Image: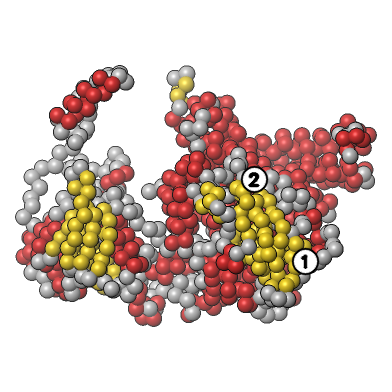
Amino acid sequence: MANCYSDHEELKFELNHPLMKRIVELKERNFADKDKFDYAPLDYADTMDSYDRVLDIVGEITATTIADNAEGVDLEGPHHEGDRVRYASGTEANLQAMVSAGMNGMTMPRRFGGLNFSITPYTMCAEIVAAKDAGFGNIWSLQDCIETLYEFGNEDQHSRFIPRVCAGETMSMDLTEPDAGSDLQRVMLKATYSEEEGCWLLNGVKRFITNGDADIHLVLARSEEGTTDGRGLSMFIYDKRQGGVNVRRIENKMGIHGSPTCELVYKNAHAELCGDRKLGLIKYVMALMNGARLGIAAQSVGISQGAYDEALSYAKDREQFGKKIINFPAVYDMLALMKAKLDAGRALLYQCSRYVDIYKALEDIARERKLEPEERKEQKTFAKLADSLTPLAKGMNSEYANQNTYDGIQILGGSGFMMDYALQRYYRDARITSIYEGTTQLQVVAAIRYVTNGSYLAQCREFETAQLSADLQPLQTIAKTMADKLEEATAKVKEAADQELHDICARHLVEIAADTIMLHLLLYNANERPDLFAKSAHVYANHVVAEVAKHHAFIMNMTPEQLAYYRQTVPAAEAE
Amino acid sequence: MSLKIVVLAKQVPDTRNVGPDAMTPQGTVNRAALPAIFNPEDLNALEQALRLKDQNPGSTIHILTMGPPRATEVIREGLYRGTDGGYLLTDRAFAGADTLATSYALSMAIRKIGVPDLIIGGRQAIDGDTAQVGPQVAQKLGLNQITYVTSIDEIKDGQITVTRHIDGGVERVQAPLPLLLTVNGDAAPCRPRNAKLVMKYKRAMAPMERPAEGLPYAEEYDKKPYLTVTQWGVADVDGDLEQCGLSGSPTKVKAVQNIVFKAKESKQLTAADADVESLVKELLDSHTIG
């Protein structure tokens, strides 16, 4: 039987990374749950076996129920009935399958009914699901909002909300408003405390809210009257059972039709504060977004995998000029590059998720006891590494998903343009990944500091010390020259000491760093499993060496004087 | 009302994904080349049982299967979805059974378990395609039976109402419990495995499969009785050796032939109504359809 997990051995390879040993040790607290819960693991091998088995279930549900429903969901989309959302019938069936399989609240502690999974296997599930229906992936993986409630909510909120999410209730994060998109500091939704009701009341409008009719919402709202910036915003929990939030409209989107995107009207909606006042944006939403960005990176990798599978199977089958088109260099070039980007992007995704796992597990332990000095150091190191890789993983994988679905359609030719083939759906679905949860441009803003502070370069230099097989050593040398270019280009930009030049070069610098790090990660994989990754490592090296040369040339040629050619001046009359 | 349910299930070679090495040169099934799976229609039967358990709290479901020790996987697959336990009938003396000997062994096991309110099995297994075992078990136990069930509609006051597939349509039938049902492949598909149950029961085994003392996890079986699957031989079910396995099987295979389906002739039709109508008439006359 088809299985979207076990059919791709690359996933199992990523799951079995040596860092998992430390992650499991931290997450399972020396397997303290084993006598309390009959499904808790006894040791490391047992934990990994459970991860593998649970991924196998998700792989099976995805290859059967979710795959079978994908086209119908895309055509039907969600329904706006009264003030509520009714999912497409296939979406309902998908959700029911995932809930009955117990795939909700996966990362939550067992005492709340969760599986206590680390983030890496959970992220893998998100990738697998997205490979067949990226839109459904949103609804399902919004469960990770519960992480934020777990981190910042109080014990009482934990006991009321987490078990519900583990039982399958859905979540949403209500951030965006008509005038607050990328710039969330401008959020206006009003939160006022009512002494009479003994709770907060929310009033206003939110827009572009994914799964906006969810059971439990995390809402960013302005609690401090008279403020206009991010420091006046707090985070609230809105429970749909309370009532007061209506769906005014479901957006008509280009892709991810399984995922209802809603405009919400809050009318004296009863809500409760999550965490402390005024930390809504600056602390909690940042945490929420980091989790969500990892989720979008996973979704993007899933879309790339789905597009690659479709293109590969078509190219194997389709004959022109008397032979299968997969045998034409012009076609296998595209397929090889798709696979290389997929493998490199996935390596980055899970490297990042493993870093997140370690620092979050330590952070959680710190809620129970004081960390030892070396644990605190470990926590800080991995938090920094995770923060540096998250925008790269999101930015690069979402761009790759767009490139891969574009190439996928190209491989199918005229058929790819037809609605009869799934690739057009992947292509439409991919388009949002480089926009929501922070555009690629905003990922660059988040990542550039790790270029200028030398963090990426240091990571590259450390990778360069790895002992690789003879076949891969020349590629390691290429990676070294790429890091040299990163160093040179960074110095050039710093030297110019011009903010505008710095900003216009930022994307190029970040891509050089990302390409180099991904090449190193792929080299590690290829060294461990040449049968799975050696081809991709070679193809990817050829690709990025050229990419890096391009970005490097751009930066080295750029001068502050040239910025005038780029600036778009708006006539004064229009600017008004 | 709470129900006692036994589900009859069989582990079968996956004949749906047959490769070139699926048959031996002698024309028998090459079991080594085919993965062993839960017989598909038995999964439909299991889903019906699980739905009854959802609707009737306190109900219990046990899977009964006959086969080599590795057939315990079928019982585990049930536990992963919410059954309460299972019985593995395994004994060299059961080997080589045709449908008569199989239904004898199963019916003896059910007597030993105690006749439940409902016995539910798949219509037929994909390896033999006989559809005989379920009905024969009912006959041996002196139970009523309803075959070709597509859904269980109601259980009330000791009466069950089901929808069953018949030629050209469906019919609704009511019968008193206890009863044996066989379920069709077009009934609801089986629910997925549940993560927590998989983690809880992944080491559930029949005694003969268990790790020897000193091996990893061997001590778990003393601590967790739910990890031990009941395993019975011929003597455990008070079976008569003459009626079991090969000696209890009157069916003799005379010869096995490889058959390759080939189109003998092909016909070109236009999309015109007259052409389509004549084809439909022809197919009706030859009883290919209708």
**Residue A255 horizontal/vertical position (percent):** 58, 41
Residue B131 x %, y %: 17, 52
Q: Position of residue B140 (x, y in %)?
A: 9, 65
Q: Residue at x 54, y 26 (%)?
A: A413
Q: Secondary structure at mark 1?
A: loop
Residue at 67% over, 59% down? A266
Question: Which residue bears the numbered disc 2?
Answer: A433
Looking at the picture, which amino acid does disc 2 mark? Thr
- The amino acid marked with disc number 1 is Ser
Say which label, 2 or 1, has the lower sequence index.
1
In the drawing, what numbered circle is on residue A419? none
Q: Nearer the viewer, mark 2 or mark 1?
A: 1
* Colouring mode (rainbow / by chain / secondary structure / one colour): secondary structure
> Is circle 2 on the same chain as circle 1?
yes
Q: Residue at x 73, y 76 (%)?
A: A195
- The image quadrant of residue B212 is bottom left
Percent of width and height locating residue B118: 22, 67
